[in-house]
Amino acid sequence: MVALKMLPLKLLLVAVVLCFFEGEARFGESGGAKRRRCLNGSPPRRLKKRDRRLMLLEPPLGGELMCRGFYPRLSCCPRADSQGSLHVENKIFSVTNNTECVKMLQEIKCAHCSPNAQNLFHSTEKEALGRELVLPFLCKDYCKEFYYTCRGHIPGFLQTTADDFCFYYTRKDGGLCFPDFPRKQVRGPASNYLDQMDEYGRVEDISRKHKHNCFCIHEVASGLRQPVGATHCGDGSQRLFILEKEGYVKIFTPEGDLIKEPFLDIHKLVQSGIKGGDERGLLSLAFHPNYKKNGKLYVSYTTNQERWAIGPHDHILRVVEYTVSRKNPHQVDTRTAKGFLEVAELHRKHLGGQLLFGPDGFLYTFLGDGMITIDDMEEMDGLSDFTGSVLRLDVDTDFCHVPYSIPRSNPHFNSTNQPPEIFAHGLHNPGRCAVDRHPTDVNINLTILCSDSNGKNRSSARILQIIKGKDYESEPSLLEFKPFSSGPLVGGFVYRGCQSERLYGSYIFADRNGNFLTLQQSPVTKQWQEKPLCLGNSGSCRGFFSGHILGFGEDEVGEVYILASSKSMTHSHNGKLYKIVDPKRPLVPEECKRTALPAQILTSECSRHCRNGHCTPTGKCCCNQGWEGEFCRIAKCEPACRHGGVCIRPNKCMCKKGYLGLQCEQMDRNIRRVTRAEKSSHTERREEQGCPSSHSSSNTCSSYTNSVQCFKQCSLTL
């Protein structure tokens, strides 16, 4: 009887327990309850009252939201204070430079501790997708907030649209989604925020705000072969010169056309690598600041055509000076090549090779460490002392047989321990470097920013501000990044264009995987601040970015371009040129319009008159061997021509009539016989005509003025 009386009570207790489990399973978006299981399939662990009391008494460490507060009753973590840890790539959770993004990532980490972890990470949807999820299934509104908060801070992970990302990571089968713990219910069917929002439209506000602040990229050229850089010559023509890794330089006109004939073609000299990570090829191009008058440009590339290197080496990094053609301003005269610098390299990475002119007029050359080890240095005596250095050279020299001089302001100008060319050293893998046209710090006349790898941790990256005499092995970097992407950093430019006022003064750079960032110097604190660069894919933008970043470019008015390619093969024409534009402004605002001048041929005095030599950047005509004179118009013959002969070409005499030989030293006897016979004939003719004898003491024809015929005969005889 007692058992029968207790039966209704037992049934009631069972019903209460079932209701409790069912209600707790419905904390996410609407959907049927599923059995609670941890990721390994085991049931979650119930926390004791004593543990829950301790959690209330002990605040979260460092103000962080800890997993123990999210799941106070049931948890899949071994301890109550455990912080869940997802088995995903570390780069996703290595963000440290955005507080809001870090906060959301800490929350998502706790999904591993959820009593519903198995349902959050596994479903029939996942099986249909055919691959494991990196994150748990997110609730729709939470997913969008995560996307807009963390985009640009998790490089290589959020490179898609918000709709595409949330289509993949939101729950669509009506099941549980993250966050699945209690929160304050607010208006709207899909509210699932942890910060207890004050209004329902926050997601839409965030979406509009981020889209409103994004920039666009417009495709302006395609069909390029591994474009690695783009620059201008500063002559007012607004031409953009695009470097292709294989050894070509092409011209992109202001009208938007690619000139078919290359500006420079040295593909037969360039040794280019096609495998991933192989940096060999055409590296850089820099135009002389006075290019409009002297037509000088400087090119760096790798080659296997060695001239002097001794000992084991893989290739030569060479810097060469060229001059534009006198007849065609759209083509370089490759016959004017003048060797400038050569460095023997052991490996095919960490080469550097960037060239640029600073506002001081000096040429800066950036060289990597070539991945050279101490053992390499001990085995090779011929290794260059320039590895891992920034060289500062003065190319404006009047010396004909010296390619450059050393600026007296170089830090090692009088040093006996360091080469005087070195301006700074301690670089490892300088990507691309840029000089600021208008530095904001009046105390610094030169602002050069470079991307580089960290020497202590090769997988990390850093941004350097190159300063005279610094050693960047120990010098702190301007900005340092944790290893978040497999792609190396690609340095860009300081934006000094006119189209975007928001980007003005920002240093734009990215990694190879297409994650864009900016650095901007505060005018008050002089500190550089990092910000993500949002690129829109729809709406006011006409196109979207895809592929790998190979380099950046800058045109004559300061606008910045992106060079990208979808593959790593140099023979495929899939390279593209993009331009960064601000959708809030017209493509070409009225105040930004500049008239492009037609490209002119060289008009300097040296370029017009120096025919048998080459002109220095300062305008001095340096003669080739065998020529002399102010403009190398006088040929030299050694030994000199004799008997009145004229030197017409080096060591080539033009002799007078009657003389032979290289220096006109021999007399032509046949010519002398003919001359005597002609004189005898003229003498007889004069005598027949009654002319006086020509053997006068004056040896002139003045005595024949009375007779015109006699005067002519006398003249012929003489």
Image (spheres, helix red, strand yellow):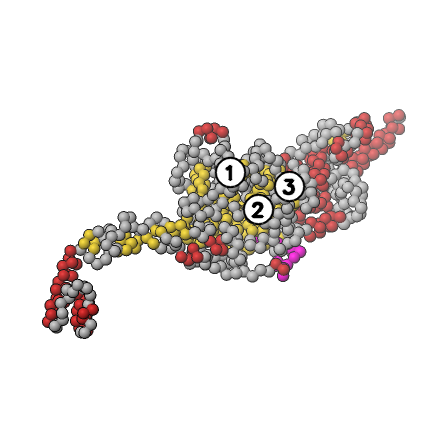
Q: What range is drawn magenta here?
A: 579-590
Q: Nearer the viewer, residue 576 or 476?
A: 476
Q: Quadrant of the N terminus?
A: top right
Circle 1 sits in a helix, a strand or a loop, which is it?
A: loop
Mark 1 to mark 2 CA distance (whole Å): 23 Å
Whether residue 531 is situated above or below residue 697 in the rendered picture: above
Tell me what residue is drawn at x 49 percent, y 31 percent. 373
Label 3 environment density (alpha carbons within 10 Å; few <14, some 14–19, many ≥20): some
On residue 540, which mark appears?
none
Circle 3 sits in a helix, a strand or a loop, which is it?
A: loop
Mark 3 to mark 2 CA distance (whole Å): 28 Å
In percent of width and height, residue 676 lies at 14, 61
Which residue, given by chain and number where applicable, does mark 3 sit on? 154
Q: Is residue 640 left or right of residue 405?
A: left
Circle 2 sits in a helix, a strand or a loop, which is it?
A: strand
Which-is-in-front pick, marks 3 and 2?
Answer: 2
The amino acid beneath tag 2 is Val
Which residue, given by chain and number where applicable, does mark 2 sit on? 435
- Return the disc, 1 or 2, that comes first in the chain's sequence: 1
In percent of width and height, residue 161 lies at 64, 48
On residue 413, which mark appears?
1
Label 1 environment density (alpha carbons within 10 Å; few <14, some 14–19, many ≥20): some
In percent of width and height, residue 210 lies at 69, 49
In percent of width and height, residue 246 lies at 46, 47
The amino acid beneath tag 1 is Phe
Q: Is residue 632 left or right of residue 680?
A: right
Tell me what residue is drawn at x 71 percent, y 51 percent. 208
Report whether residue 561 is seen.
Answer: yes
Q: Nearer the viewer, residue 565 or 478?
A: 478
Q: Is residue 585 magenta?
A: yes
- Return the disc, 3 or 2, that comes first in the chain's sequence: 3
